[in-house]
Image (spheres, grey):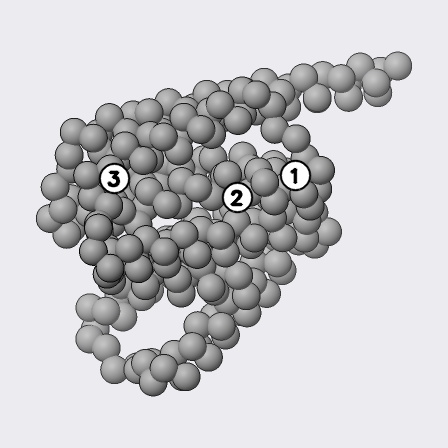
Amino acid sequence: MFLGLHFLFWMESFSHTTVASAMILTALEPVFVVIGAYFLFKEKTSKVGIISILIAVSGSVIIASGDIGVSKTALYGDLLSVLGTVAVSVHMLAGQELCRKMPSIIYSFAVFLIGGLVLFVYNICTNVSLIQYDIKDWWIFLLLALIPNIFGHALFNWLLKYVDATTISMAILGEPIGAIILAYFLLGEMTTVSQLVGGMIVMISVMIFLKYKAAELEKVMALQEKSNIS
């Protein structure tokens, strides 16, 4: 249900604000996940992790600092993006618990089915057409189903069995960079100096975080090996 709400809020935000402005708020996902993981699972994040998260968020702020709208329409789009980010954070936290109890393919099937039903009900209630679209639009729908879902969310669901939701959320922070690049080539949205600088900061912080988590995992595995040998 929360994955469906994420798609609903976040996709709608692009109708009211720029790609950069909508993407900046997705950088808040690891913050929401860290807070949720602490209260739900009592997971603590190290100082290195917290610092890298704050650096990544600051980089994302820089990326879209010149694009955040001040009009009511743009602010509405920003609000929708925040709601979408909160929704996907809840989805990730729930997935972290469930993916360790069942095969990821079963979990993904159930999540995509329920998420699709949420959007279906919304479209029916708001009289949105379900079939009257051009052939080009249907090809785009197919690509959205294959790339972001199969190679995106389904892959994340599989990873939740092996790593925590916070790590995956940090890795997703590279998404604004790709989105801004694609927006330039496909939508003609110009890339600013602030977006380039902020993008570098985001990528560096993500690399620091993932490198730290890898080192942390190696230590845990080494301790387990010593314990098994003993």
Query: Going 20% across and 44% down the picture, which residue do you hit?
Result: 67
The mark that comes first in sequence, 1 or 3, is: 1
Secondary element type, mark 1? helix
x, y percent for residue 17: 23, 55
**Category of crowding for the residue at label 2, using alpha-carbon neighbours closer than 10 angstroms: few (below 14), some (14–19), many (at least 20):** many
The mark that comes first in sequence, 2 or 3, is: 2
Label 2 – label 3 distance at C-alpha? 20 Å
Front residue of this view, candidates 1 and 151: 1
Disc 1 residue type? Tyr
Disc 3 residue type? Ala
Disc 2 residue type? Phe
Q: Find disc 2 in the rendering and name its residue.
A: 32
Q: Find disc 3 in the rendering and name its residue.
A: 64
**Category of crowding for the residue at label 1, using alpha-carbon neighbours closer than 10 angstroms: few (below 14), some (14–19), many (at least 20):** few
The mark that comes first in sequence, 1 or 2, is: 2
Res 38 label: 1
